[in-house]
Image (cartoon, rainbow, N blue to C red):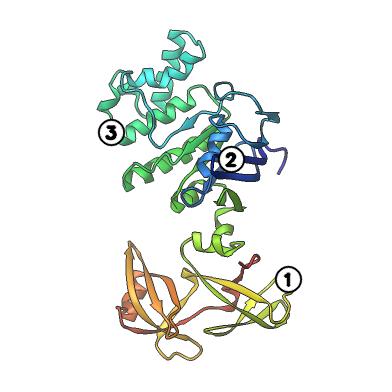
């Protein structure tokens, strides 16, 4: 990466009785779309508030455009934020809401109106400028909030779970809208979300946080396929983890003894014999066949979860180990799967991912 546009350097934030952000380092390029994910309370929204200047860090620094933000208040940073609650003013019209940041910057009334109407037109709301906020739908209000954040032509936009209050159909539409805006404007987006589908659809890179610390940063496909530790693997939601003991190694492979048997796992580094290790098999990498298939791992179907064109199959081995498997609907029908059905699992050794950081 060339010189970063946003740099978090040992960024730390403590509240009374709570260490929210623990000395994190992160570099974000100009024009990049970065999504920050993690469980509730992991520090992702606090990190966004620190970048915005709404909270003061306890330690470390934030640099935007090469300039330290130490002591610079939020209104001087030009880091607008789109909130989950939207925070629109009910006593102002749509156009007045959009123009409000320009009013704070002492821009003249005529110019404020012109620029507000221009952004409303870009957001497909040109005919709604003089309506009350209460007259708009949820999706329309979301667009007003985005227009208000962008009317000052910032070089960075911060978004804190902006789509979480919308229904599923509107979320997909707004994802498309945000992606279009990002490509058109070429500015930096930093986006906090709980939704893996949003992050994967929108972001160039994903940041996974836990307990105030960054666990992994990478492209969505890399974080999904190559998690660095068990926390990230489990947070991704559709990974199966097997833990065991190294019994041998040769030609870039480990023989790992687990409670379910011995498995060959590709590796990029050496592991001592008798050391502990763990590997991941993604839910969509597991093949299903009739019970008793040679080389397979026998299990019992304990449940199925319908998710549109795919289903998640939950199975359990005789020893009590559970697996999650994702299959297309036609594959489920071909195997006539149902709770109680005996089934055989298998996967190609090359699809096993040895966790670099075993915890």
Write the residue at 66% across / 28% down. Answer: 70
Quadrant location of residue 277?
Answer: bottom right
* Front of the two marks 3 and 1: 1
Q: Can residue 261 be seen at all in this image of the molecule?
A: yes
Q: Tell me how far mark 3 sits from mark 1, CA to CA.
A: 55 Å
Write the residue at 62% across / 61% down. Answer: 228
| Disc 3 target residue | 137
Q: Are marks 3 and 1 in contact (CB under 8 Å)?
A: no
User: Could you say whether the residue bearing mark 3 is in a helix, strand or loop?
Assistant: loop
| Disc 1 target residue | 269
Mark number displayed over residue 14: 2
- Residue 246 drawn above or below residue 112: below
- Residue 350 drawn above or below residue 220: below
- Residue 214 drawn above or below residue 61: below
Q: Nearer the viewer, residue 180 or 158?
A: 158
Q: Are marks 1 and 2 in contact (CB under 8 Å)?
A: no
Comes first in the chain, label 2 or label 3: 2
Could you tell me which quadrant the N terminus lies in?
top right
User: Could you say whether the residue bearing mark 1 is in a helix, strand or loop?
Assistant: loop
Q: Is residue 233 left or right of residue 267?
A: left
Write the residue at 55% across / 78% down. Answer: 348
Q: Position of residue 68 (x, y in %)?
A: 69, 29
Mark number displayed over residue 154: none
């Amino acid at each position: 990466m060339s010189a970063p546009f946003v740099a978090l350097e040992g960024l730390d934030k403590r509240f009374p009785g709570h260490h929210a952000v623990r000395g994190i380092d992160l570099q974000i390029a100009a024009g990049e779309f970065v999504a920050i994910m993690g469980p509730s309370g992991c520090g992702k929204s606090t990190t966004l508030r620190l970048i915005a200047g709404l909270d003061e860090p306890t330690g470390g620094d934030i640099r935007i455009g090469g300039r330290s933000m130490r002591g610079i208040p939020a209104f001087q940073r030009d880091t607008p934020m789109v909130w989950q609650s939207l925070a629109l003013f009910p006593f102002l019209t749509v156009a007045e809401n959009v123009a409000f940041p320009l009013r704070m910057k002492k821009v003249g009334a005529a110019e404020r109106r012109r620029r507000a109407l221009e952004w409303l037109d870009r957001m497909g709301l040109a005919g709604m400028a003089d309506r009350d906020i209460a007259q708009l739908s949820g999706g329309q209000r979301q667009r007003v909030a985005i227009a208000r954040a962008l009317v000052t032509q910032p070089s960075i936009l911060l978004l804190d779970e902006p789509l979480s209050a919308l229904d599923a159909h509107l979320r997909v539409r707004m994802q498309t809208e945000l992606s279009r805006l990002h490509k058109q404007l070429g500015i930096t987006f930093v986006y906090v979300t709980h939704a893996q589908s949003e992050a994967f659809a929108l972001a160039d890179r994903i940041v996974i946080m836990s307990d105030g610390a960054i666990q992994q940063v990478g492209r969505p496909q890399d974080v999904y396929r190559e998690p660095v530790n068990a926390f990230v693997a489990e947070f991704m939601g559709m990974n199966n983890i097997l833990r065991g003991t190294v019994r041998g190694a040769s030609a870039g492979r480990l023989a790992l003894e687990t409670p379910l048997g011995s498995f060959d796992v590709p590796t990029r580094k050496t592991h001592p014999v008798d050391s502990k290790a763990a590997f991941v098999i993604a839910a969509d990498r597991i093949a299903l066949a009739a019970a008793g298939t040679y080389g397979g791992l026998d299990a019992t179907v304990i449940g199925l979860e319908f998710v549109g064109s795919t289903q998640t199959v939950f199975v359990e081995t005789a020893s009590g180990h559970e697996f999650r498997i994702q299959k297309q609907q036609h594959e489920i029908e071909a195997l006539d799967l149902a709770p109680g059905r005996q089934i055989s699992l298998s996967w190609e050794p090359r699809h096993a991912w040895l966790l670099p950081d075993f915890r």
